[in-house]
Image (cartoon, coloured by chain):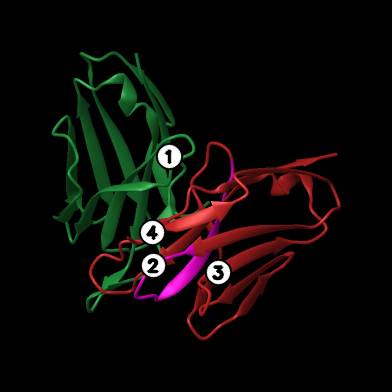
Chain colours: A green, B red
Amino acid sequence: ETGVTQTPRHLVMGMTNKKSLKCEQHLGHNAMYWYKQSAKKPLELMFVYSLEERVENNSVPSRFSPECPNSSHLFLHLHTLQPEDSALYLCASSLFFEGESYEQYFGPGTRLTVT
Amino acid sequence: KNQVEQSPQSLIILEGKNCTLQCNYTVSPFSNLRWYKQDTGRGPVSLTIMTFSENTKSNGRYTATLDADTKQSSLHITASQLSDSASYICVVSPGVGGYNKLIFGAGTRLAVHP
């Protein structure tokens, strides 16, 4: 185990549903990340939080809404998704210190299917 | 444009055989290169990390090489095992500070058959 947990591991939702993905890290890190992994494509960075403040938002549609209540927890709220949003959503965490981030540790991911 | 290209896209080998996976990158500036292993349904786990000055790094049966001049890296797996079946992802860090915007390759999917 990497010290990063994600729930649920699998999620099937309709396009009109609202659901949330949860990530928790037990590594004492101060930065957390959401990535999207689609089949046969590189990981795409969605959001970065450092010390609970959002510092990156890579042109992600507003139907994805992140929340970071503290340095150990990260959520991704989902609403009115599209079928093309079906993917593996990975959470990661790392230390960030003096302008540099260190190795990222990934959670197991949530396999999302939008019907 | 910063890119990481991996080949082959997929590979099938027999248990006990060796194999080599390739990674070419156009990322500049360059800080480090990592190889990750991602089992099906799991997140990526780091195997090796190499900086500009390192040209080889081993982790058990995994050996990574780096040629920073030609911007190429390889991951060699010796005496493959069934548990080596996974995707192997090459990741390059530009190292320009900030939140370490890693550049990911699309991965090589390796299947080891008995």
Same-chain status of marks 4 and 1: no
Say what amino acid the circle numbered 3 marks: Gln
Q: Secondary structure at mark 3?
A: strand
Q: Which residues are magenta?
A: B25-39
Q: Mark 1 or 3, which is nearer the eye?
A: 3
Up/down of A60 relative to B104, above or below: above
Labels 2 & 4 near each other (Cβ < 8 A): yes
Same-chain status of marks 2 and 1: no
The residue at which mark 1 appears reads as: A109
Question: Label 4 to label 3, Cα distance in Å?
Answer: 14 Å
Res B103 label? 4
Q: Is residue B1 visible?
A: yes
Q: Nearer the viewer, residue A79 or A74?
A: A79
Choose the circle earlier in sequence order: 4 or 3: 3
The residue at which mark 2 appears reads as: B27
The residue at which mark 3 appears reads as: B72
Residue B52, image x and y in percent?
48, 82
Q: Secondary structure at mark 4?
A: strand
Residue A102, image x and y in percent?
36, 70
Q: Chain of mark 1?
A: A
Residue B25, image x and y in percent?
46, 64
Question: Label 3 to label 2, Cα distance in Å?
Answer: 11 Å
Same-chain status of marks 2 and 4: yes
Say what amino acid the circle numbered 1 marks: Gly
